[in-house]
Image: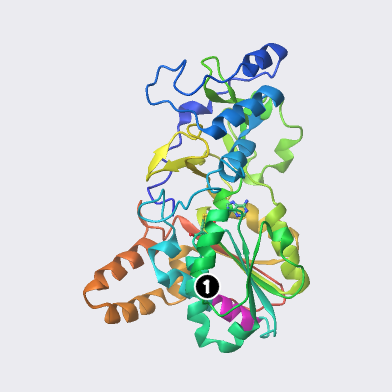
Amino acid sequence: MRSIGYGASSDASRVGVKLIHPTPAARNMLAADPPPPGEGEERSDFRMTPLEAEIRRIIAVDGPIPVAQFMALALGHPVHGYYAARDPFGARGDFITAPEISQMFGELIGLWAAAAWNEMGGPGRVRLVELGPGRGTLIADALRAVKVAPDFREALAVDLVETSPVLRQRQQTALAHCGVPVSWHASLADVPEKDPLIVIANEFFDALPVHQVVRAESGWHERMVGIGDDEKLVLALHPDPILNFPAMLPANLGTAPIGAIFEWRSDALVTDIAGRLVEHGGAALIVDYGHAGSALGETLQAVGSHSFADVLERPGEVDLSAHVDFAALGNAAMRAGARVLGPVTQRQFLRELGIETRAAMLETAAGARAAEIDAALARLTEAGPRGMGELFKVLALADPKLGALPGFG
Ligand code: SAH
């Protein structure tokens, strides 16, 4: 997980309702060349990342850009984006995710997929699609665990959706001897639309670009990234309110006070997943950190080298992520005709799948290292700032013809 606690990075004072006007005067100011690294800066540690220089050029030409576009560039720029050139996981990386904490996580998700396949009637061909597989640890653990279900393994083809060349390489290594055909795609849209499918996404949606909108007297305004009077990147609001935005807001947020922030993401991906499940059959499992019901508030955070950073600083070199709004995902999936299960807490999901029994088995075999398994179990299932058990939620989407799926009560 973005494993160093949550929420602490939100700074209410930054909610400010200052408006950036992309007027000609501002554009001239914005068009000024960015100061070269090390020059014109008082902070001695200042070093402009190559991506910041590029973002400044974009702002100079187009004016301030939405926070969502900034996030998309910071994570996904093909050369300078955070995921383009690095493996950010693990004890020495920026953060650690559930499959990197323990093999139990991927194993149980593999068994969940086998159960879903059974529920689908055990089709002779099924695509196991993972969105953003990181190091490939989850899928490797899952494929090993489903050796207990040879008919399922026999039916499987694995499709990995990954943009990062570095991580694709890691995934290739992790799956080198998995015994199942594997292909890679840049987006779900590239995964062929045939065969029933089972989709897995762990800590993927939190990395998708999030829009921030702020309530002002004049209505809801998109929050933008521009260049401030001091030449630094700055957050400010688009001068014009978004037309009809109140109609898009979840009903429970209708009375937001001035200064309130709401974060939202495009529904396109979840709508695509749900549409495929309805048309071809199957199920999807989405695990992420976030909230079960839509809520106001700013959750966008930056993490680098195991500590929080400013979201605007060192773009491309720190990880950006924001809470997932599970209600929004579920509603979009239902609109597309899918059945929605959950969200439930990660603790409930993993316990129902038998993580405690699995941990006990591994501990018996582990001897002196049993304490490590116990610690991993606690990390995955407990509440509190270091535990993932409650902050992380699990949502399943399914073809409405499927019956019950394990983990959801
Ligand atoms: N699921 C993994 C990794 C989570 S990090 C784990 O739990 O350890 C997010 C992953 O999604 C990385 O593999 C990253 O390269 C990939 N990613 C991020 N944005 C993406 C996008 N828009 N399209 C495809 N992959 C993306």
347 drawn magenta: no
In the displayed structure image, the side of residue 381 where residue 278 appears, left or right: right
115 drawn magenta: yes
Residue kind at label 1, given as amino acid type:
Ala
Tag 1 residue: 176
In the displayed structure image, the side of residue 143 where residue 254 appears, left or right: right
What residue is at 25 percent from the left and 72 percent from the top?
A: 369
Q: Which residues are magenta?
A: 112-119
Q: Where residue 10 sits: x, y (%)?
A: 46, 36
Residue 163 sits in which quadrant? Answer: bottom right
State whether residue 345 is above or below residue 177.
above
Asked whether the viewer can see residue 168, the reply is yes
In the displayed structure image, the side of residue 395 where residue 239 appears, left or right: right
Residue 130 sits in which quadrant? Answer: bottom right
Front in this rendered view, residue 260 or 386: 386
What residue is at 64 percent from the left and 55 percent from the top?
A: 329
- The residue sitting at the left extreme is 368
Quadrant position of the N terminus in the picture? bottom left
What residue is at 71 percent from the left and 72 percent from the top?
A: 399
